[in-house]
């Protein structure tokens, strides 16, 4: 008889491969039908679970919590790496307001509705805290699949809010779960103080890790490019772990560390971004699959009515009202306010937070978990399926040029003198219709490549710039302004 261990490992890898492959392939269907991929991944996990076709018995909430924590840290780190600094300056105030006051107000609104549907105040407050944060990853997955480009301020506000509001939701959930287990031991003033301290410590340490990581990467060249993602991954784990051990918000720290690192001229910058993007997607897939396995569909029937009602309250009443209140001082047009209020999708974070009461042994924790799952699914499906339509209906598509079919990038271990810039040739530019040989370039500047549809065009003297071309050129920092005068704004800005 063959040894049991190799067969068990083979069975585990086969199961993981099938689930992972099915999840990736289902993402194509998600794009076509306009349903967030998160929902389809959860369905795959439920089908594979103990009450589904797969029959996989899984109820390890502790493992799900640890996996979800790691996954969320990686997702937030990747989000920080890709946060545009220019838009951050314009959107940080409204996004921070939504991520702090907005989370608290949403939690209170949902808790009030839950109390009206029969839950006690301690349980209702935990439920409200758990579902109070948004998940922009689902929103942008739908937008990318629809080929839409959202206006920068709206998109950045949603993205920053989702990166900043998870820490607040985590702090609220932990505190209110403790209150559910031991009622009356956490006064509101103490809760407010704990939130402020955790956010302050998380912000300080996150920025410190980001700045320290910049210097570490700059002063310590590594022997091979494959080691750089390993080092940035270590920085992400340290940002979360050390901050949490010191009493701060690890999720805020890891997001800010990624944001600070992402604005530096890192070695192999493009490759690093691609690696962390892949890790973020793998984290989302694994997280949703495991959370789907945790759910027992038969138990959802008991909370279906309450779940639908609370989801509608969250989508139609609580979220739009809170967003309108929070954005009122910033004079957002009503279309943008309505859009941000509607596109407040809930993702896997609330389901991860719902494991807190279960692990703490809180009364009614199992009901809260399945109720949260139902609310998240309904909340994701209803607004999620209408994101593309609403974007067009409210006229919030940006007029940014389309992305090129091919991207040119330079990977380097050390900082290089000069810059690689890309430009989209608009018909209104002075260079449109002009041969390359007629343009007077500075000594340190030259066109490297032209992407024309599906063709790579080698730049020659007789080559004419056509509207719709994507032009890549190398220039020196002192000549950047002249290049932008000729070709317009660089695409990466």
Image (cartoon, helix red, strand yellow):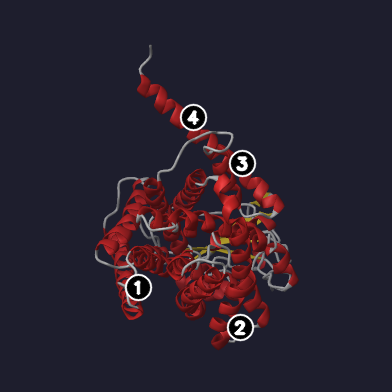
Q: Crowding at label 3, few (<14), some or many (≥20) Cα neighbours within 10 Å?
A: few
Q: Which residue is mark 1?
A: 199
> Which mark is drawn over residue 25?
3
Q: Residue at x 37, y 20 (%)?
A: 4
Q: Which residue is mark 2?
A: 332
Question: Would residue 68 be found to the left or right of residue 458 on screen?
Answer: left
Q: Earlier in the sequence, mark 1 or mark 3?
A: 3
Q: Earlier in the sequence, mark 4 or mark 1?
A: 4
Q: Position of residue 270 (x, y in %)?
A: 47, 55
Q: Which element carries disc 3, helix, strand or loop?
A: helix
Q: Position of residue 272 (x, y in %)?
A: 43, 53
Q: Which element carries disc 2, helix, strand or loop?
A: loop
Q: Which element carries disc 4, helix, strand or loop?
A: helix
Q: Which residue is mark 4?
A: 14
Q: Earlier in the sequence, mark 2 or mark 4?
A: 4
Q: Crowding at label 4, few (<14), some or many (≥20) Cα neighbours within 10 Å?
A: few
Q: Nearer the viewer, residue 59 or 322?
A: 59
Q: Earlier in the sequence, mark 4 or mark 3?
A: 4
The total of numbered circles placed on residues is: 4
Task: Give the answer, above or below, for where 314 lies relative to 17.
Answer: below
Quarter-of-image position of residue 252: bottom left
Q: Crowding at label 2, few (<14), some or many (≥20) Cα neighbours within 10 Å?
A: some
Q: Quadrant of the N terminus?
A: top left
Q: Residue furthest left?
A: 246
Q: Quadrant of the C terminus?
A: bottom right
Question: How far is the residue under mark 1 from the one under mark 3?
Answer: 39 Å
Question: How far is the residue under mark 4 from the one under mark 3?
Answer: 16 Å
């Amino acid at each position: 008889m063959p040894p049991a261990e190799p067969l068990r490992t083979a069975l585990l890898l086969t199961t993981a491969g099938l689930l992972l492959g099915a999840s990736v392939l289902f993402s194509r269907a998600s794009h076509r039908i306009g349903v967030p991929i998160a929902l389809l991944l959860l369905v795959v996990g439920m089908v594979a679970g103990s009450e589904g076709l797969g029959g996989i018995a899984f109820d390890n909430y502790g493992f799900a919590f640890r996996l979800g924590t790691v996954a969320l840290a990686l997702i937030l780190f990747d989000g920080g790496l890709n946060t545009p600094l220019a838009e951050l300056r314009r959107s940080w105030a409204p996004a921070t307001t939504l991520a702090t006051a907005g989370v608290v107000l949403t939690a209170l609104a949902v808790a009030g509705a839950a109390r009206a549907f029969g839950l006690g105040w301690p349980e209702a407050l935990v439920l409200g805290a758990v579902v109070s944060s948004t998940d922009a990853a689902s929103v942008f997955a739908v937008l990318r699949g629809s080929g839409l480009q959202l206006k920068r301020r709206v998109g950045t506000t949603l993205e920053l809010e989702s990166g900043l509001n998870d820490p607040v939701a985590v702090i609220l959930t932990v505190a209110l779960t403790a209150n559910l287990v031991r009622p009356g031991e956490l006064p509101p003033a103490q809760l407010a103080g704990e939130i402020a301290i955790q956010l302050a410590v998380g912000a300080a340490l996150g920025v410190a890790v980001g700045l320290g990581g910049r210097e570490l990467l700059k002063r310590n060249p590594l022997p091979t490019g494959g080691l750089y993602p390993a080092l940035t991954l270590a920085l992400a784990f340290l940002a979360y772990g050390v901050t949490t051990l010191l009493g701060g918000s690890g999720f805020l720290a890891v997001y800010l560390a990624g944001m600070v690192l992402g604005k530096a001229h890192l070695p192999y910058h493009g490759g690093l971004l691609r690696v962390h993007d892949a890790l973020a997607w793998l984290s989302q897939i694994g997280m949703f699959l495991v959370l789907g396995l945790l759910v027992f569909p038969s138990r959802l029937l008991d909370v279906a009515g309450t779940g639908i009602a609370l989801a509608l309250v969250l989508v139609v009443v609580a979220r739009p009202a809170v967003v309108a209140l929070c954005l009122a001082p910033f004079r957002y047009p009503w279309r943008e306010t309505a859009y941000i209020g509607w596109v407040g999708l809930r993702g896997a974070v609330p389901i991860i937070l719902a494991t807190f009461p279960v692990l703490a042994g809180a009364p009614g924790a199992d009901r809260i978990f399945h109720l949260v799952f139902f609310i998240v699914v309904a909340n994701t499906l209803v607004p999620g399926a209408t994101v593309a339509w609403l974007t067009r209906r409210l006229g919030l598509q940006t007029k940014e040029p389309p992305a090129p079919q091919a991207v040119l990038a330079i990977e380097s271990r050390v900082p290089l003198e000069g810059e690689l810039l890309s430009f989209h040739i608009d018909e209104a530019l002075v260079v449109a219709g002009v041969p390359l040989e007629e343009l007077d370039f500075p000594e340190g500047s030259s066109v490297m490549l032209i992407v024309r549809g599906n063709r790579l065009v080698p730049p020659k003297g007789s080559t004419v710039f056509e509207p719709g071309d994507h032009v890549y050129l190398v220039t020196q920092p002192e000549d950047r302004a002249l290049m932008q005068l000729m070709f317009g704004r660089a695409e990466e800005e």
